[in-house]
Each structure stands twice: as C-alpha cells, then as structure tokens.
Amino acid sequence: MTSTNAAEDLEGEVLPGDWTVVGRIRPRQGDTGGNFSVNYWVEHSSGRRGFCKVLNYDWLINTGVPGRDPVEALATATRIYQFERDLARECVGLSRVVTALHDGSFHRDGYSIALVSYIIFEVAEGDIRRVLNQSVRMDAAVRLRTVHQLATGLRQLHQRRVAHQDVKPSNTLVFPPDGNGARVAKVADLGRATVDGRPMDHDDYTIAGDRSYAPPEGAYDAVPDGFGPRRLACDMYQLGSMLCFVFTASSFNAFLFRELHPRQHPVNWLGSFDEVLPYLEDAYGRAIVAIGHDVPEALRPRVERLLRQLCHPDPHRRGHPKARRGVGNPYALDRIVSELDLLAHHAELRFGAA
C-alpha cells in the first residue's frame, strides 16, 4: 500500500467486471480540473481498453468542502458519484456522448479512505486540444465537423432535458478514425450537468463548470431563472466558444473581455448586469470581428453569424432566430446543428477533409 486513499492505489487491481487497472493517468501541463477524480487506464479480459474515472473521496471530504462535517461531506461525495453514474447509464446509446462501459463501488481494507467508486468510459484518441496541437495543419472542414458533432451531442442531451454546463476543449473528445477514415468527436464528463427536475448540489452554483468558458452572466453574478435561460443558454454560449476555439485556440471570453474597458470587466464592475449589458454587446460585436480574422474568408460570414447567435451576452437573446420566433423551445439546437452541418460540408467541398 502506497497511499491512505484507496482511489490513489489501484494499479494492478482487478475491478469487478473483469477490468484490470494497468496504469494511472497523470495530468499533463495545461490540463484543467482533475481534483474530483483519480484517473486510470484499464483493460478488460477481452482486450478492450477503457478510461476509468475514480471519484476522489479523500479530496472531496478533506479539501473540496473545508469545514464540513465528514459524514455530511461523504454523503455529498456519494451523491456526486451516484448522479454522474446514473446519468452516464441513461446516456448510453447517444452517438455523440462518450459511452460508459461499466461502473461499480467496493471497499479496500487497510485504507483510511477505503471506498472506491468508479465509471469506465470508452477510450478516445485525445481531447480537441491535443488533436489541434498534434496537427501541423488541421483543415477548416475538420474543425467545423468537430464542432458540428459536439453540437449534435449537446442536442442529444437537451432532448433528454440535460444541460452539460461545462463544455470546453478538455470535455470534447476525439476518437480514432472510423471505417470511413473520419474522426468522431463526442461530448464528455457529465459531472457538472443539470437534469431538469432532478436537483443536484452544484445546481446552486453561479458557475457550475470552468469559469473561462462560462457565459458572462455568471461572471457578473446575474444568472437568470428557468432551465432554458440558465442552463440551455449556458450550453449555447459554450458551444459558440468552442467554435471560436477551433479557429483561434482561445475561448470567446478571452476576446470578449479583451474588448471591454477595465472598469466594465467583471472583476471591477460595481453596477448591475443590465447596466453593463450594452457595453458587453458592443464588445461582443468587436470580438466577433477579431475572431473572424482567423477564419478562412470563404467561411467567415457564416461562422460570424453563428457566433452572434450562440454567444450573445444576453442569455435571453441566444439561439437561432427562427427557433426564437417559433413555438416551443427557443434554445432548440436543431437549426444550429443543421447550419454547422452545411457549413462543414461546404468547407469539405471547398478545402477538402483532412
């Protein structure tokens, strides 16, 4: 035994379901998150590899919620695991959401934190950042197809009344080429998701996921009420930020806040969100023009239009105009998915797919 926390000492262990833990995955430079879990490569007796996410009860109890009663902290940690486990099970079969292969919990004697709770997922080639970094030239068509597939995954979740809330590069996984030679992107990590009608602890957070990709209303502590304006509009903004990222390697927020006067930046602003909104709208227009400089000229107008629809600083104005004018969900992603599909197809014809 090399640790008092069983989750950190699993190499060589055979998990229930005949999965063997073959090695721990250490965070690389630039990785974000990771406190909630300890990650391993695992291999099934059939030869299939998996990515094993083990909940880090030790961190959650002793660091994640300082000052909380240990029994209450353990109950919270257990709820976190059960929520993600149950949601992962429900999402098996969604083609653009990473598939959970197996899950379980057990105790290992001799550890102060003896409970091990894990979920095993299918193995990706890497997240979108590593694919971009490893490519000398990734064709614009591939970039757009990746965002189209990500949008499809979000639509699949939204159709089940699930909002992801933490869409970012490290949660956009790219899988090895399929039988047609094309990579497939899927949305990963539902640990910060919100399920309509199923409350969870993190639902009360102003920003549930990564702050650098969160929509601006969260940064100004002005999140709206309602599943659509608060949750679905958050996913829309983050999807737009990923469209920005694949061309610029930066989030939309990086451009948005760069265009603001320091007095209007969320760390300095003393007024209300309604008062700062006109400044944000002005900055967002300039940000889109700046982003457009990194987009091929033939694609620029349509990419800029999508960014305007997805990343409007007012959550009540996000979405496709026809969805907003129609009957039903104004945050429906159907038309956005179709626009991205057509745009990726246009890029494939014009530039060719990598």
Image: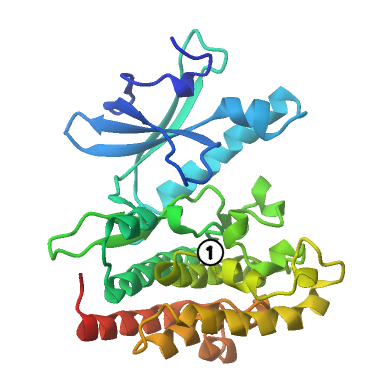
Q: Position of residue 214 (x, y in %)?
A: 61, 62
Q: Position of residue 342 (x, y in %)?
A: 32, 85
Relative placement, left or right, of 338 versus 229 is: left
Residue 218 at x, y percent in the picture: 70, 63
Q: Is residue 178 left or right of residue 142?
A: left
Question: In the depicted view, which residue is nearer to us: 103 or 143?
Answer: 143
Position of 236 with respect to 128 (left or right) is right
The crowding category of the residue bearing disc 1, from other C-alpha atoms within 10 Å (few below 14, some 14 to 19, many at least 20), is some
- Seen from the viewer's position, the closer of residues 140 and 7 is 140
Question: As drawn, is 168 to the left or to the right of 23?
Answer: right
> Does residue 309 show up?
no
Residue in the picture at 73% in, 66% down: 223
Q: Nearer the viewer, residue 223 or 85?
A: 223
Q: Quadrant of residue 287?
A: bottom right
Q: Residue at label 1?
A: 161
Residue in front for this viewpoint, 103 or 39: 39
From this view, report whether residue 336 is shown above or below residue 124.
below
Task: Give the residue at x 60% y 29%.
Answer: 59
Label 1: element kind: loop
What residue type is disc 1 on? Arg
- Which residue is found at the position 56% from the left and 18% from the top? 113
Query: Where, by quadrant of the figure, is residue 343 drawn?
Result: bottom left
* Residue 177 image position (x, y, % from top left): 19, 58
Q: Quadrant of the C terminus?
A: bottom left
